[in-house]
Image (cartoon, grey):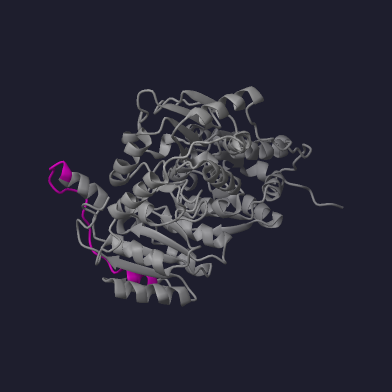
Amino acid sequence: MSETLRAADALAQRLYQEGCRFAFGMPGGEVLTIVDALTRAGIRFILAKHENAAAFMAEGTWHRTGAPGILVATVGPGVLNGVNAVANAQQDRVPLIVLAGAIDADEAQTYTHQVLDQTQVFRPITKASFTLTAGAAHVIADKALAIATQPQQGPVHIDVPISVAVAAATDGKVHRSTAVPVIPNDTVLDNLSEQVKVAERVAIIAGLDAISEAGASALAKCAEALGIPIVTTYKGKGLVPEYHDLCLGGAGLSPKADAILLPMLATADLIIGLGYDPIEMRTGWRNFLTDGQKMIDITTVPNTHYMHQGSTNIIADPVATLEALCERLANGTGPLWPPSEVQATKAKLAQAFPHDEVWGPAAIIDECRKILPPDTLATADSGAHRILLSQMWECYEPRGLMQSSALCTMGCAVPLAMGAEIASPDRKVVSFSGDAGFLMVAGELSTAKELGLKTIFLIFVDASLALIEKKQRERQLPNAGVDFGTHDFAAVGRAFGGVGHKVTSRIELQTALDAALRADTFTVIAAHIERGAYDGRI
């Protein structure tokens, strides 16, 4: 006799079929059946020390596998701990499935301990919120995955009541048909290609919705064929290898970089926004188009942000549309931006950030990029170091640098790096954190040890919220609420079973990195820098 398929099993098996192999969280009594079902389905459950970190670990696996991440959280305080990372997933377009324990509806009428309306909490910060039922378990599982993975991608929450999880799934298996990428019709494509042909200077800004291997290939092919320079958002770094002659790197956060890139873009008569979502950008990119400048905006959803308005707005698959457009331009005389101007801009960007600094945050990033393997995967926490890192850390592939670009949440780099290494154990992974952000998630070092990870955790130590302190000084406000103690982070690393180094020079950092590449456990490198070390750097 075949074993009864529980509603939790139906959900878990559908997640496995979608390619999910990892789930992260902190179990409570209300989610034990979920954890059991995931394990039976072949999905490894990984115990984190906090639900917020667990969600970022799940995102890290998605960056490497393409399968949605899974967060498992128990009722009440457990699932609420993950709210920040779920909101981040919504803004950063991360397909995250949030499986939350829930009290049965009848029970909740008279039992109030830890009970709240979780669907109301998650509805504003997810693409959809469901409550699992045994009679529609297959349908809800399939709906959740369809919604999470269709453009624009994002998180979906599913409440799983205790009795429903163990109840027999009574509906039949349901699978949506595979979606076909949408491209504009011939008339629209002809119009787009004509706009490109008559333009003298065309530039591309590529963003979130273009990030894929196919997007990288199409973008490089089109740019090379037509001599079009490319600017990316920070999430889009690596869509074209940043050593490429036509790649001008990331934009939208560093005032120094934007002061170089925006004037150059202002000389273009046509800009193509390829999956460009200005949710990553700062105020300088609001209505950045100049008078008479045209923009073809190719996005997966209509523009409701109003940070800019394209002269031609295309709602379609950005990558498929670019490929179709380039086919039409293959035999045309496409625009050729003077190579000398593009190279001059690249040179200005390189000179703007001090690779020759004796010691400081720029020196640290420079040494890491020199010593760590070219295919090293990196993560960045929010803070002053992220602005500098996102300009100086060259990326050679999509998702080579993972960060919270839209919500800019602190404490993400460490768990993102761990998730990436869990999914890609053959790749070297380095996490860059400020000391404040690292303190938020330091307990996850125990998870790194338990999992046998060899991640390098590099911390910029200046005992201050450096970016906020800098803004405070610039506004001539008194120092308040931004300073904290200097801690022995190297000793913290050793206490959790890893290797720890304190470095104060390039030579010491070189030695620590060399040792980290040979270590059989994780490494914490505490790089101590002076207060105000970012002044004039970002």
Q: Position of residue 530 (x, y in %)?
A: 20, 62
Q: Relative to 484, does residue 264 appear above or below in the rendering?
A: above
Residue situated in front as seen by the camera: 6 or 179: 179
The answer to which of 303 and 152 lies nearer the viewer is 303
- The answer to which of 90 and 151 lies nearer the viewer is 151
Farthest right residue in view: 1
Residue 504 appearing in the image: yes
Q: Residue at x 24, y 59 (%)?
A: 463
Query: Between residues 478 and 300, which one lies in front from this camera angle?
Result: 300
- Give x and y (percent) for residue 470: 21, 48
Name the residue at 69% across, 35% down. Answer: 180
* Residue 57 to residue 183: above or below: below
Relative vertical location of residue 293 with respect to residue 40 in this rendering, above or below = above
Count of numbered marks: 0
Instruction: Residue 49: tell me if it is visible.
Output: no
Quarter of the image where one finds residue 263: top left
> Looking at the picture, does residue 287 appear above or below residue 234?
above
Q: Main secondary structure of the magenta part?
A: loop
In percent of width and height, residue 209 lies at 53, 39
Q: Is residue 485 magenta?
A: yes
Q: Which residues are magenta?
A: 474-493
- Check residue 358 for magenta coloring: no
Residue at the farthest front position:
333
Residue 185, horizontal then vertical, whole percent:
65, 25
